[in-house]
Image: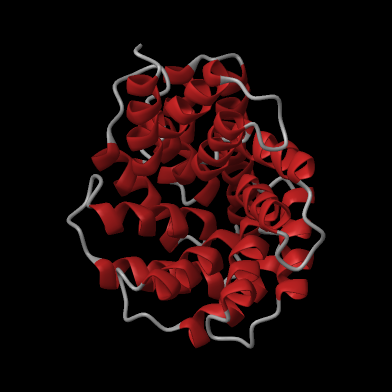
């Protein structure tokens, strides 16, 4: 009898794994309803990835109306089952009250849980909370080791944030050479924020030889990566003809892009330049 029970458990486990795999196949084919059904079944049987993926479909609105409330339900179960990335995702939702009741303490708890499980985003988000001081009391000393851990775990925006701390002397002894090193690692790793910060260092000649052309190149890379400050700085450089050939048209383009990313100075300068040009 014992052997039969064990065999049934193995068969059941394979079936639940099959639900998840079927969900992945359906998702890859953009058959989102089928993917959701399979991921939901896997979730019901305790598969954390199934819960996380079902939540992602609701959160992103794949093949359906976006539904943050349903996403939060699946993210919560995924987090409880040990899917640390979804703990971090859920924490972000608690910051803004997206699909859940706004609760900064819960966000901190979730980021901490994720970070303790060696999730890079959890460590980064917790460190960012301590730097910004909007969801928890500002404490740069607590942010530093969190960013350092996120760096070790491969989070390249964390290199950039840590670089900013060294550049500003925020919670650490100011060291612009260290900042340059960290911004370079961030940018080389694909962090648009890192490229933007490194570009500004080249533009100002801070900790490195001033090089406007290199600054423009880095700001363009940052802007193409979706960084609002990179777009703004590139727009200003085109307006002034610094490091690039002067172009009012491109100045408006990049200032407008910064504005579209909700960067306030981008909107203000876009309006000013447009008025000056009589457009």
Q: Is residue 48 visible?
A: yes
Relative to 266, is 117 on the left or the right?
Answer: right
As drawn, 212 above or below 231: below
Nearer-the-camera pick, 38 or 170: 170
The quadrant where residue 186 appears: bottom right
Location of residue 53 in the rendering, given as x and y in whole percent from the top left corner: 49, 38
Q: Residue furthest right?
A: 209
Nearer-the-camera pick, 222 or 243: 243
Q: Residue furthest left?
A: 101
As drawn, 186 above or below 164: above
Location of residue 165 in the rendering, given as x and y in whole percent from the top left corner: 58, 74
The quadrant where residue 105 appears: bottom left
Location of residue 249 in the rendering, given as x and y in whole percent from the top left corner: 53, 16
Nearer-the-camera pick, 128 or 227: 227
As drawn, 256 above or below 7: above
The quadrant where residue 115 appears: bottom right
Location of the N terminus (image quadrant):
bottom right
Location of the C terminus (image quadrant):
top left
What residue lies at 44% left-to-right and 59% top-to-bottom?
87
Relative to 180, is 252 on the left or the right?
Answer: left
Relative to 203, is 143 on the left or the right?
Answer: left
Q: Is residue 83 visible?
A: no
What residue lies at 33% left-to-right and 66% top-to-bottom?
107
Nearer-the-camera pick, 111 or 74: 111
């Amino acid at each position: 009898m014992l052997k039969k029970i064990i065999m049934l458990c193995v068969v059941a486990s394979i079936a639940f794994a099959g639900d998840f795999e079927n969900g992945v196949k359906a998702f890859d084919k953009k058959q989102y309803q089928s993917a959701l059904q399979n991921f939901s079944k896997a979730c019901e049987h305790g598969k954390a990835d199934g819960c996380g993926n079902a939540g992602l479909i609701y959160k992103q609105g794949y093949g359906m109306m976006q539904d943050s409330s349903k996403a939060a339900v699946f993210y919560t179960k995924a987090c409880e089952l040990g899917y640390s990335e979804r703990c971090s995702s859920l924490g972000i939702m608690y910051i803004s009250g997206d699909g859940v009741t706004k609760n900064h303490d819960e966000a901190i708890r979730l980021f901490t849980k994720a970070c303790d499980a060696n999730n890079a985003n959890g460590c980064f988000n917790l460190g960012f909370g301590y730097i910004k001081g909007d969801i928890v009391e500002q404490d740069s000393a607590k942010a530093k080791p969190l960013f350092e851990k996120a760096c070790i775990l491969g989070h390249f925006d964390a290199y950039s944030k840590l670089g900013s701390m060294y550049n500003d002397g925020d919670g650490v002894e100011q060291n612009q050479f260290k900042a340059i090193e960290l911004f370079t690692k961030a940018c080389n790793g694909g962090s648009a924020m890192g490229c933007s910060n490194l570009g500004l260092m080249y533009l100002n000649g801070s900790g490195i030889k001033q090089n406007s052309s290199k600054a423009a190149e880095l700001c363009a890379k940052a802007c193409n990566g979706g960084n609002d400050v990179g777009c703004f700085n590139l727009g200003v450089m085109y307006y002034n003809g610094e490091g690039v050939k002067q172009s009012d048209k491109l100045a408006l383009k990049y200032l407008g892009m910064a504005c579209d990313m909700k960067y306030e100075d981008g909107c203000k300068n876009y309006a000013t330049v447009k008025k000056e040009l009589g457009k």
